[in-house]
Amino acid sequence: MSPTDETPQNTDPTPEVPDENVEQALRVGLDDYDLSEEDVALLDADGDQDEDDTPAGPLPVLAVVGRPNVGKSTLVNRIIGRREAVVEDVPGVTRDRVAYPANWAGRDFTLVDTGGWEAKAEGLNLAVADQAELAIELADAVMFVVDGTVGATASDEQVVRLLRRSGRPVVLIANKVDGPKQEADATELWSLGLGEPFPVSALHGRGVGDALDAAVKVLPAVSAVGGGALPAGGPRRVALLGRPNVGKSSLLNKLAGSERVVVHPTAGTTRDPVDELIELGGRTWRFVDTAGIRRRVHLTKGADFYASLRTQTALEKAEVAVVLVDASVPIAEQDIRVISTVVESGRALVVAYNKWDLTDEERRHYLEREIEKELVQIPWATRVNVSAQTGRHVEKLVPAIDQALDSWETRIPTGRLNAFLGQVVAAHPHPVRGGKQPRILFGTQASTRPPRFVVFASGFLEAGYRRFIERRLREEFGFIGTPIELSVRVREKRKR
């Protein structure tokens, strides 16, 4: 019999259980499981957060500075507990990443490796001074690394003068101190006037803990330079991002109605983020033009290297990022990397395909195929086709940005969330693995901006199943234009 055949059926509707009752029943059942104090605090606070609540501000920033080949990247790897910064026994080695999340003694902070300096005989002092000054500007505190086996050099003393002018707290590191003899030599660094030198062997870990204890003592609870707290009021902050020469400055000029920033065919014209208040759609917005993010930070050096750092800082200050992609040419790896940077930062996202006036029907056909292939991970991103040169469709940025921000700040009531999870699990339970089938016990939304969900489960949820839940969350609640985060806490039943 086909599903369309008419057959007598019981037409009495199944009574729906109120979402609040579902939540209460699941919450009571969760009491049978071992929960940490953090779990209990999260559950007790559930649903009580104000919609406008935001973190007090970004994590404090600790910069590791010093002249080439003193062991900065070795120290960074030691602090973060993994080999991530590239290390070689030559000065000026380039690195894949700049900022790393770090933790010491229960304190979270951002660790910045200020590598990428090139050691050249000519102009070294000027180059070191220029780059160190920019690095120090972006930090709340500084770890100044000196080669303890060599002692202070003229270049070291030049950086010391910058540190004094900056007023930043400084922890002086005498690196490569592997034994008592070198430790005695390291005491000579008192002469730099930066206080006690901490003898450290970044390679072996000797003394690193004492140095970190001193560093976290001088770090503020909230960064004063790493983005500041997101504003609760005032104009919404929009960062314009994209690879070099994609049209960011042209778009800002078009929106501002004036030549606010320099535009030139040469890639990399913009180096410092430029803020501009823009009247658009009957409201005032704060747009920030940024330097182009290159494919790899290690492909940049000098001013370009620190332009990338400042772009990261501008993104931290923003609430939504408009990523420009040149629609007239194939999507490049740099475009994907910029978009990934925004997603990882947790900011709302709008992808603006610029230079639309330079695309014909054939190019647009291939662009759609490229989007399906290269940007398959972000089908949720809001999309706008614009021309910064002619101003075509720039007014469509407002509804796209509004939609992304609304999703970014969306909160799902806990009862509704758990009723939804119950329906999903009933229809598509987790696969049985090793004779066990993990169950989702309870779900809650921990925060917004971006939406972060915590799911309590009786066992490990496979990555594929987590992606399935995220996809269903988007289908049910929208979340267009915002990344969402889903974390799972596996908890076992209490032993009776």
Image (spheres, grey):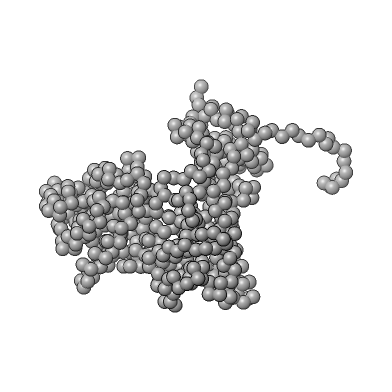
Position of the N terminus, as image quadrant, is top right
Whole-percent x and y of residue 387?
56, 72
Query: Observer-nearest residue: 474 or 411?
Result: 411
Looking at the image, which residue sits at the far top? 496
443 on left or right of 116: right
User: Residue at coordinates 43% horizontally, 55% vertically from top-left?
Assistant: 317
Q: Residue at x 63, y 71 (%)?
A: 365
Tell me if residue 286 can be seen.
yes
Q: Position of residue 87 (x, y in %)?
A: 30, 59
Q: Is residue 102 left or right of residue 174?
A: right
Q: Is residue 15 above or below residue 245?
A: above
Question: Residue 493: image x %, image y %?
Answer: 52, 29
Expressed as whole percent of the image width and height from the top left, the position of residue 438 reads 57, 37
Q: Identify which residue, 129 or 26, lies in the foreground.
A: 129
Measured along the vertical axis of the image, is residue 243 above or below residue 172?
Answer: below
Which quadrant holds residue 192? bottom left
**Could you tell whether 187 is left or right of 74 in the image?**
left
